[in-house]
Image (cartoon, rainbow, N blue to C red):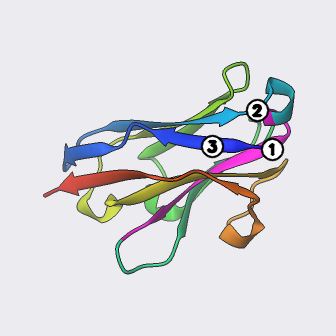
Amino acid sequence: QVQLAESGGGLVQTGGSLRLSCTCAASESTFSLYAMSWFRQAAGNGREFVVGISSSGGRTTYADSVKNRFTISRDNAKNTVYLQMYNLKPEDTAVYYCAARPVIVEVASREYDYWGQGTQVTVSS
């Protein structure tokens, strides 16, 4: 079983930075089998793919809206995936979720087996 818990959300001004973390309650060997992605959901909208990293960490996929502003990384020894966000904009305001699926990243939320509870990110203008 894989349990995910996000942290690091909060309120930040436009142009500011935040780092989100997602920790997996499973063995290191289990965590290293899973691709990890971040999705977000703004009020009244559907869940949107943001960025993902393959199980090995060797491949990353970014949504165009966050390229060159967000960076995903993972530490398999700590069972944790990180999302570093720079130059935040009001349109980045959303609940951010981490999700896990085997090996490779997919952009469709229906492809993911496990989800965290989400962490709120609010960017003020």
**Residues at badges 1 and 2 in contact (C-beta under 8 Å)?**
yes
Q: Residue at x 34, y 74 (%)?
A: 43
Q: Residue at x 80, y 40 (%)?
A: 55
Labels 3, 1: front one: 1
Q: Secondary structure at mark 3?
A: strand
Relative to 74, does residue 121 appear above or below in the rendering? below
Mark 2 — residue?
Answer: 26
- Residue 13 in the figure: left or right of residue 50: left
The extreme left residue here reads 125
Mark 1 — residue?
Answer: 1
Q: Position of residue 110 (x, y in %)?
A: 72, 72
Q: Residue at x 42, y 79 (%)?
A: 45
Please, what is the three-letter code of the amino acid marked with disc 3? Leu
Rounded to the nearest angstrom, the CA distance separating label 3 from label 1 is 10 Å
Rounded to the nearest angstrom, the CA distance separating label 1 from label 2 is 7 Å
* Mark 2 or 3, nearer chain start: 3
- Image quarter where the N terminus lies is top right
> What range of the chain is rendered magenta?
31-42
Q: Position of residue 29 (x, y in %)?
A: 86, 27
Q: Residue 2 falls in which quadrant of the image?
A: top right
Mark 3 — residue?
Answer: 4
Q: Is residue 75 visible?
A: yes
* Mark 1 or 2, nearer chain start: 1
Residue 105, labelled with which disc?
none
Name the main secondary structure of what is drawn in magenta: strand
